[in-house]
Image: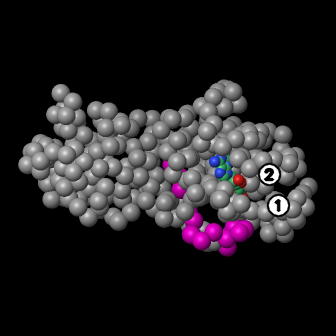
Amino acid sequence: MEKDIATPKRTKEILEKYGFSFKKSLGQNFLIDTNVLHRIVEASNVTDASGVIEIGPGIGALTEQIAKRAKKVVAFEIDQRLLPILKDTLSPYEHVHIIHRDVLKADVSQVITEQFKGYDDLAVVANLPYYVTTPILMKILEEKLPVRAIVVMIQKEVAERIAAEPNSKEYGSLSIAAQYYAEAKTVFTVPKSVFVPQPNVDSAILRLTLRDEPPVDVPDEEFFFDIVRASFKQRRKTILNNLSKHFNLPKTEIEGYLNDANVESRRRGESLSMEEFALLSHVLYAVLYK
Ligand code: SAM
């Protein structure tokens, strides 16, 4: 039995064998700590009945640990140079399927239909390329893919923004966008030393547990998220100023709508709960689209 891929020694051997050079532009920071990998897989609650979608398998460090637990793993990898390496390192795991594609351009829903027919439990587990963390997460959430949970290693700062509560400096439109679809929790943080090469930023494991239903009722999702983004456009300005500018309407008029939604006009976006944004979007939708 070969040793785990994610030891500093074996990773170095693999990289040297194939003369692999990291591409910073593809966010290539590989994990070399099996303990961290075990904790990621643990946090995903994957069982031998689960199907797992991985994004960016690299040389297979995380893929291998998922494969030891799950029924099947399907991984999207953009970098062609990694395909022969993965074929080699993951050869003991027949239930791993690699797809050479940019996940942002992939029809993931179609892949799920083809690869995971009859599966009751699906999860996304990944050490994400940091340059596209948010687009990847928002794609999975907005496409409403049938997954139970998303467990990902991302920049600590982004994890904190996603899981943030109102009245904190991290709370913003990204928190609401993610929490509309899922319950968010930062599970643990990791030092830079668990990667080669080491990234410039600290990292954290974020778990998103997808909701069956959104936690609030909105008149129109696009409109709701538009109001949220507009309210945070200039964080230090009041919601009154931000919305009046966004809709190009007099402050007195916006003030009336805020009153109707029970939102004091001097408040800032960061103090509004998702429920308050939902109510406000109903009021504004009714007057603007009547
Ligand atoms: N999973 C490996 C690990 O933990 O060691 C590698 C993680 S590394 C942070 C990110 C991986 O994502 C790299 O293998 C990179 O080539 C791949 N990648 C970058 N952009 C991608 C994209 N748009 N679609 C699919 N894979 C991508």
Per the rendered image, the range of residues in magenta is: 193-208
- Check if mark 2's residue and mark 1's residue have beta carbons within 8 Å: yes
Q: Is residue 56 left or right of residue 135?
A: right
- Up the image or down, 121 lies above or below 195; here it is above
To which residue does mark 2 refer?
82
Of 52 and 26, nearer the camera is: 26
Question: Within the image, what quadrant is residue 221 found in?
Answer: top left
From the Cβ of disc 2, is ligand 1 less than 8 Å away? yes
Label number found at residue 20:
1
Identify the residue at horizontal 56%, vertical 47% (top origin): 136
x, y percent for residue 194: 68, 69
Q: Does the magenta portion include 21? A: no
Secondary structure state at the residue bearing disc 2: helix
Say whether residue 238 is visible: yes
Secondary structure state at the residue bearing disc 1: loop
Identify the residue at horizontal 80%, vertical 69% (top origin): 8
Tell me the CA gap for discs 2 and 1. Answer: 8 Å
The total number of labels drawn is: 2
Of 48 and 40, nearer the camera is: 40
The quadrant the C terminus occupies is top left
Q: Does the magenta portion include 203? A: yes
Q: Is residue 22 left or right of residue 168?
A: right
